[in-house]
Amino acid sequence: MPANRKLGRASDQRTAILRNLTTAFILNGKVVTTVARAKEISKISEKLITEAVRERENFSSKEVTVSTAKLDSKGKKVLVSKTSKNGVKYDVVDREIKKKMVQVDNPSRLAARKNMAYWLRKSHDAEGNTVNPVNQLFDVIAPKYAGRSGGYTRIIKLGTRRGDASEMAQLELV
């Protein structure tokens, strides 16, 4: 018996479908698709959520110095006039140095993030901002299921689809 369903597609098309559906599922919390695809997405997302719950607090914080451009009242970069050794004048962005606390992942959490990045693609929200589903998995979903050990998804069968009569289902987070 094969490890996963073939879904009537070539392997590259199958992984593309599963990646896109898994990303949509993690970002939206539910997705409507065929039963076979829903079972595959459920299997993938259960593993991803379990890994996120396990590695949820496996990081350390570190203070780093960051150089940022100074901004004026309108939000534009402040330019400073400089002169080179040859006497040529040019404008340079004025910079300020700040201390900032950053989160540094431990090796096992970094490996988990890389595994999640294989299945989850960066996406855009309604306003057009880029959303990283891996961050949402760690920041929103993992704390929600911290006390739970498995069973994060639910499949609800919806009946047949008009047109090709394939069995439809809604996959959602519990």
Image (spheres, grey):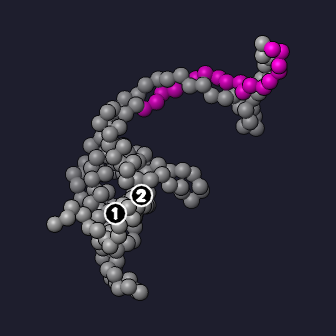
Residue furthest to the front in view is 10
Any part of residue 39 in sight:
no
Do the CB atoms of the residues marked 1 and 2 lie less than 8 Å apart?
no
Q: Quadrant of the C terminus?
A: bottom left
Number of numbered discs overlaid on the protein picture = 2
Instruction: Kindly identify the residue that appears in the image at 38 percent across and 61 percent down.
Output: 12
- Bounds of the magenta segment: 86-103
Question: Which one is nearer the viewer's eye here, 10 or 152?
Answer: 10
Residue 65 falls inside the magenta stretch? no
Q: Are there few (<14), some (14-19), or many (20+) residues within 10 Å of tag 1?
A: few
Question: Which one is nearer the viewer's eye here, 14 or 147?
Answer: 14
Secondary structure at badge 1 equals helix
102 left or right of 173 in image: right
Q: Which residue is mark 1?
A: 11
Residue 99 falls inside the magenta stretch? yes
Real-space Cα distance between discs 1 and 2? 18 Å
Secondary structure at badge 2 equals helix
Any part of residue 5 in sight:
yes
Amino acid type at circle 2 is Thr
Residue 59 position within the rendered picture, expressed as x and y whole percent measured from the top left: 35, 33
Q: Which residue is mark 2?
A: 23
Residue 136 position within the rendered picture, expressed as x and y whole percent measured from the top left: 42, 49
Instruction: Kindly identify the residue that appears in the image at 83 percent across and 19 percent down.
Output: 88
Q: What number is the disc on residue 47? A: none
Residue furthest to the top in view is 85
Query: Marks 1 and 2: which is nearer the front?
Result: 1
Q: Quadrant of residue 111?
A: top left
Looking at marks 1 and 2 on the same chain, the residue that comes earlier in the sequence is marked by 1
Residue furthest to the left in view is 1
Amino acid type at circle 1 is Ser
Instruction: Kindly identify the residue that appears in the image at 76 percent across and 38 percent down.
Output: 74
